Image (spheres, rainbow, N blue to C red):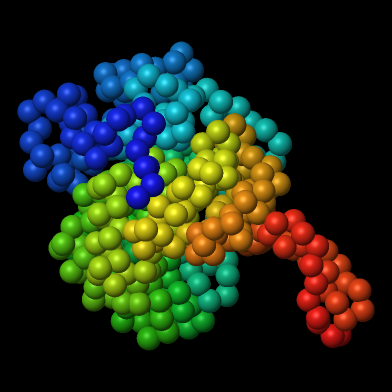
Amino acid sequence: MTDLRPAFVPECDHHVDSFRIRHYPGVTPETWTDWRWQLRNRIRDLEEAERLFVLTDSERAAIRKRTGMLPLGITPYYAALLDPDDPRQPLRRTKIPTLEEFERHGDECEDPLGEDAHSPVPGLVHTYPDKALFLVTDFCATYCRYCTRARMVGGGEFLPQKGMWEQTLDYIRDHSEIRDVLLSGGDPLILADDRLEWVLERLHEIPHVEFLRIGTKVPAVLPYRITPNLLRMLRKFHPLFFSIHFTHPEELTLEVRQACERLADAGIPTGGQTVLLKGVNDDPEVMKSLNLGLLRVRCKPYYLHQCDPIEGSAHFRTSVETGQEIIRHLHGHTTGYAVPTYMVDTAGGGGKVPVSPGYIEGREGDQLLLKNYQGRDTRYWDPV
Ligand code: SF4
């Protein structure tokens, strides 16, 4: 198996445990692997961050300055994967804020996808004809510095009451064109099993809702959440799909690989969603390593997302050409299952547009002129 260990630790599969013993003495393995303990003990403030990481001036100032939405929040498990000394380490860049986050460039705005304008009731986005996005909470296990919903996650970390969800459920019941509901947030998997079950049950009994999906980063940042009880509950709601947000092959630790395997064993098809990020994963070999690693745990790389122009994200954004080069590097050069669709989410609710590179060069009569994966000119007989 390809070595997916973080570069700064020699023994990844034991690294998380060594981190626990060093930084959380007295915390037993049973407590450490309790997902609720992990949530209660997230790194939320400067004092705790200073205890675990050698911070730069920019990181320290950004943690002090950040108030309100998109706070600092890192599970102790995920903190073990961050390099304590190197602020340029890819995973660390995605979780510890810097002052670059407070700069504004070009078309950046709070809600670049125009989700608020397509929200007929609070907590629901209905942009496409037959699918809807159900935002069940604003709480995430770990906050990503490039989050598209930075405007609304982590503010109060509210756990919505069932009454708040009823309005959304009523809207879905009243719109028979909705066949696909994606639960997102925030992260649906931070809900307790019984609360998540309550929502899934209500959605499952709506006759026109044919598929349920859960969009989550929890398997990557809090793999202990994928418990036997959760899986037993989820199995009742097939067809249920998971879209799991992965960023870098260094996330594919033993714990995460086991969590993905458990989901697959429960009959839940999983797809990987990755945001293309400058200096983090904008390297063809890094992306290939991530995608092949996901396939090994039966998670199909589904979408590669261009980083949305939320405020303060310019330091993460690459050109679209960079993303296309990565797809060119994958297509034909490795198994097709490892090639995601590259997407740009367009302004003001225009929706996702595939921007994977084209291979059609033109036409000569009945011949379509094509470029193959090696860059060689080739043809296909395609009578008009
Ligand atoms: S887990 Fe998802 S919703 Fe939460 S901060 Fe990260 S990208 Fe945003």
Figure quadrant of residue 341: bottom right
Q: Going 45% across and 49% down the picture, which residue do you hit? A: 290
Q: Quadrant of residue 235?
A: bottom left
Image quadrant containing the C terminus: bottom right
Image side of residue 140 versus residue 57, left or right? left
Outermost residue to the right? 365
Q: Position of residue 279 (x, y in %)?
A: 55, 33
Tell me if 320 is positioned left or right of 126 in this view: right
- The answer to whether residue 151 shows anywhere in this view is no
Number of numbered discs present? Answer: 0
Q: Position of residue 186 (x, y in %)?
A: 38, 50
Query: Which is more toward the observer, 12 or 273?
Result: 12
Depth order, front residue of 204/31: 31
Q: Position of residue 349 (x, y in %)?
A: 63, 59
Residue in the image at 28% along x and 60% along y: 261
In this view, the residue in front, 111 or 343, is 343
On screen, residue 103 above or below 370: above
For residue 367, above or below residue 334: below
Q: Is residue 181 left or right of residue 305?
A: left
Q: Is residue 320 above or below residue 44?
A: below
Residue 380: percent from the left, percent from the top? 78, 76
Look at the image and tell me whether residue 188 can be seen.
yes
Rendered residue at 86%/67% (across/down): 362
Residue lying furthest top: 57
Residue at 43% x, 70% y: name it.
181
